[in-house]
Amino acid sequence: MADADKRGGAAILYLDDLDVGQRFSSGSHVLDAAQIKGFAREFDPQPFHLDDEAAKATLFGGLAASGWHTAAVTMRLLVQSGLPIAGGIIGSGGELSWLKPARPGDTLTVQSEIVEITPSRSRPDRGSVRVRSETRNQHGEVVQTFTARLVVPRRAASPSDNSSAESAPARSAKG
């Protein structure tokens, strides 16, 4: 059972609360040209992120958010309302793909699914969870996918708990 603590209106979840196939949806974030250009000026100063006219002559055909900006917005959405993981969202690796550019006026949301749960054999207080997240625009088009391996704490074992993380097998989605 999830703790009474809340983040973004959802109960905080531990490894023991998660199931393969469990889904989460985030709130939304609207991108505008000022955000795109501000992020680009500081972190990814390329013409297709900074200049409307110059961007028209690129393969993007217009101003596009940096993929790193899209990833940063995704992280914010996951933290604020998408994945209410106890202890925060602590990554230990992953795979990131940008399928479509995010543009000014796009409303981004994130849909996540638990793909695999693996209790730690050496650290019984935690485990690993693989989560696949899709960042979508207002048309439902996937602009980014991110499959992350997260470190997730387990609930403190009660004295009457006879289960052992050592013998708990990994659980994963079929396919």
Image: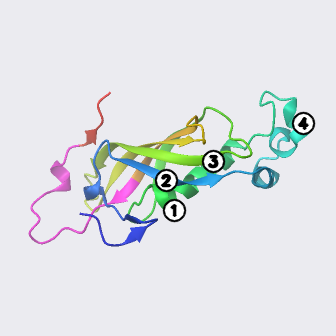
Label disc, if present, on residue 107 of the rendered structure: 3
Comes first in the chain, label 4 or label 1: 4
- Give the residue at mark 2: 26
Proximity of marks 3 and 4: CB atoms separated by less than 8 Å: no
Taking depth in this image into account, of 144 and 163 the one nearest to the observer is 144
Q: Nearer the viewer, mark 3 or mark 4?
A: 3
46 vs 167, left or right, is: right
Q: Which is more toward the observer, 34 or 93?
A: 34
- Give the CA separation, mark 3 to mark 4: 24 Å
Q: Amino acid at mark 1?
A: Gln
Which circle, 3 or 1, is nearer the viewer?
3
Name, please, the residue furthest toward the front. 139
Percent x, y for residue 106?
67, 45
The secondary element bearing badge 2 is classed as: strand
The image's mark for residue 80 is 1
Disc 4 target residue? 54
